[in-house]
Amino acid sequence: MRTHTRILVIGGGPAGSTAATLLAKQGFEVTLLEAAVFPRYHIGESILPSALPVLDLLSVRKKVEEHGFVRKGGAYFEWGPENWELNFDHLEGSDTYSYQVIRSEFDELLLDHAKDSGVEVHEGVRVTSIEFDGERPVSAGWDRGKDSAESGTIGFDFLIDCSGRNGVMATKYLKNRKYNEAFRNLGVWSYWRGVKPLDKGPEGAIAVCSVPDGWYWDIP
């Protein structure tokens, strides 16, 4: 691994791989550190048409199109006594659809594209600490897992923290992450095979429905 990089990105999910790819395409030296080894499971599978222009910026839209994800035509809502559909065909422009993705595959596709775009990617490497010069972060400590003897430090000119819920900078250093008490609740999820498609809503739609004590979504 380099001992210094122009830009260090923490996290190889969609945010990290997107930021890294865009910067690499502009000629910047970018190093990305991802704690997991892809493919890895992640929840959050339903994306919106507004993501498609971003895929174009990344020059990765064709790869996503050819991968075979479920094409998403909109959404179906059953909320209390009200039922309605949101059909992406009614949107202006050419981006009148989106995808229901399998995150392990989608995220790996984006990370592989970052590698192809010139990003130096290291999987299975977690950031353990950030060093500062005054208020400016200047280097990161890393290792290959708590049971690994391999560790080191990488300096950088700029840092982009895309570590998601872990929030390396937000939780450990800036301490500016605040939880909204309204969202202090419980969510559960599961997956089923061989389920018939919904007979309501646009093809490939997500269904969002309310129940007396909460709400749920179904993603094909």
Image: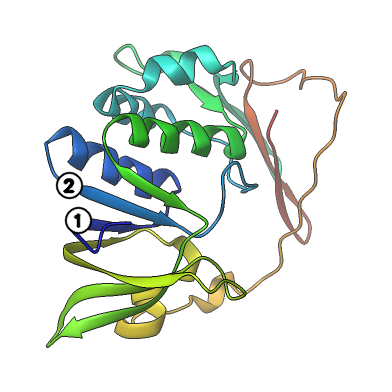
Picture quadrant where residue 77 is located: top right
* Image quadrant where one finds the N terminus: bottom left
Residue at horizontal 23 percent and vertical 48 percent from the top: 30
Measuring from the top left, give residue 97's x and y in whole percent.
46, 18
Closer-to-camera residue (12/155): 155
Q: Residue 111: in sight, yes or no?
A: yes
Q: Is residue 162 positioned above or below 153 on the image?
A: above
Horizontally, is 153 left or right of 137 in the view?
Answer: right
- The tag on residue 7 is 1
Q: What amino acid is labelled 1 in the image?
A: Ile
Mark 2 residue crowding within 10 angstroms, few (<14) / some (14–19) / many (20+): some
SS at circle 2: loop
Q: Earlier in the sequence, mark 2 or mark 1?
A: 1
Measuring from the top left, give residue 42's x and y in whole percent.
61, 48
Q: Is residue 107 positioned above or below 196 on the image?
A: below
User: Between marks 2 and 1, how big is the CA–CA gap?
Assistant: 6 Å
- The tag on residue 29 is 2
Q: Residue 96: in sight, yes or no?
A: no
Picture quadrant where residue 21 is located: top left
Closer-to-camera residue (120/11): 120
Residue at horizontal 62 percent and vertical 33 percent from the top: 102
Closer-to-camera residue (182/144): 144
Cβ atoms at labels 2 and 1 below 8 Å apart: yes
Residue at horizontal 34 percent and vertical 36 percent from the top: 114
SS at circle 1: strand
Q: Is residue 211 positioned above or below 194 on the image?
A: below
Q: What amino acid is labelled 2 in the image?
A: Glu
Q: Residue furthest front?
A: 149
- The tag on residue 133 is none
